[in-house]
Amino acid sequence: MKPVIYLVYLLLTLQLLSCKKAGADTAGISVNFPSHALETGGGLDTLLQQIGNARIVLLGEASHGTAEFYQWRATISKRLIQEKGFDMIAVEGEWADSYRVNQFIKGPAKDSVQAVALLKQYDRWPTWMWGNYEIASLVTWMNQYNQSKQAGDKASFYGLDVYCLWESVQELMPYIQGNDSLLRIAQQVQQCFQPYSADPMQYATAVANASANCREQTQHLWQSVLSFTGGQTATNEPQFVMQQNALVALNGENYYRASVSSYPGSWNVRDNHMVQTIRRLLELHGPDAKIIVWAHNTHVGDARYTDMAEGGLVNVGQLVRQEFGQNNVYAVGFGTYSGTVIASNDWGGPIEIMTVPNAQKGSWEELLHRQSATNKIIFSNELRQTALANASIGNRAIGVQYDPSNERGNYVPSIIPSRYDAFVFIDRTRALRPLGTAARNEPPDTYPSGY
């Protein structure tokens, strides 16, 4: 199937899945969920208490273009780092670009101007996801925080995603200089993909149509690098980075091949790669390591308690709960009733500030607004006996490509107290502040789902 045709098919499928269940009939029902005020800080105190000794905290977002989601995730992350000893933040972003952020925050003292310049390297569409002033503020804080820490105690910043496979091969090169065998294998991977790097659709089609050769080369590269570094996750950071760049090449080839031929295959490849990277980062940092993950609600909230499961989709929230245990994982969803958001009308198109319409009647967000037009935190363990909350309710999900006039297609039917451990509700939100970086002509982030 042609990539553009497949993308249209995919978006229509997601819309139909989201429309299939309208959720519980809540018209006229009084809403009185237990809640905790967000502005006073008391809600965050309770959140940290409930997180307890969890090693993995998942912080979601209902869109990739909402300022408050980034700001509150940053506030929560700072407290987790300072008060609970979390070692790192890992984001739904590219490995190579994010590792440069990691080096920046662990280096000499820098100011916000330098942080903004650094983040302009996130130039793959949608550039605003990590190239924005809210992230610049967080990166500046992390750099300042690390100035008083010993090397082993510095907070880290990593990317979890599967994109940038040819950039990752390029980033691998300095680590394998002097090893003629690994250099030759890496150059063979580059030669396989180089003809298509300027056009993502031509590239993805070529991978699908001639995947055997590229797949063989990326597998050979990964196995060779893994063998050279001891056959397991490296605990030496330079060797870990070497491995991770080879792993992105391996899983990236698999992802792009699946993205034009198999859904939910491509989604599942991507989320499994994110979980594999989470596991590896925890192994790198040791048995007591703790990680904060920033990703869209569709990745963070356990897919088993949404209609995603009916389509054969798994996600990060489900997989880490299954692997690490429910008590070691704490998932926080984020949502809004109305406001503005950064998104685009067309895939790969220009940035627009769009109006987020009032949430649909009967949706999770509309119920929280109906209760009170205030910012609040809802904890799932306080909702267990609430029949309304435990019904299948639409939970809004806004992608990077967004059509506010088609609001019905923007909801994921969810059993909220099972999907998340907590939910941060911002009644009215504002659009993210992007840096205005021009996008490269490469496969876009969040392709093909928009999340």
Image (spheres, rainbow, N blue to C red):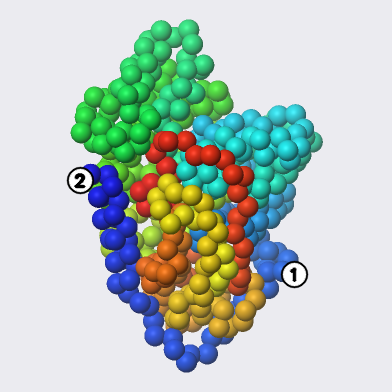
- Tell me the residue at 32%/74% (across/down): 21
Using the image as rendered, state which of residue 231 and residue 100 is in the foreground.
100
**Residue 435 screen position, x and y as percent:** 62, 45
Q: In the rendered view of the protein, which quadrant contains the N terminus?
A: top left
**Residue 226 screen position, x and y as percent:** 41, 23
Amino acid carrying label 2: it is Met
- Tell me the residue at 50%/35% (across/down): 95
Q: Which badge, 2 or 1, is on the more N-terminal residue?
A: 2
Instruction: Identify the mark at residue 40; answer none if there is no mark.
Output: 1
Judged from the image, the secondary structure of the residue bearing numbered disc 1 is loop
Q: CA distance from mark 2 to mark 1?
A: 52 Å
Using the image as rendered, state which of residue 192 and residue 201 is in the foreground.
201
Judged from the image, the secondary structure of the residue bearing numbered disc 2 is loop
Task: Tell me if 413 is positioned left or right of 420 in this view.
Answer: left
Q: Residues within 10 Å of mark 1 (few under 14, many from 20)?
A: few
Using the image as rendered, state which of residue 271 and residue 433 is in the foreground.
433
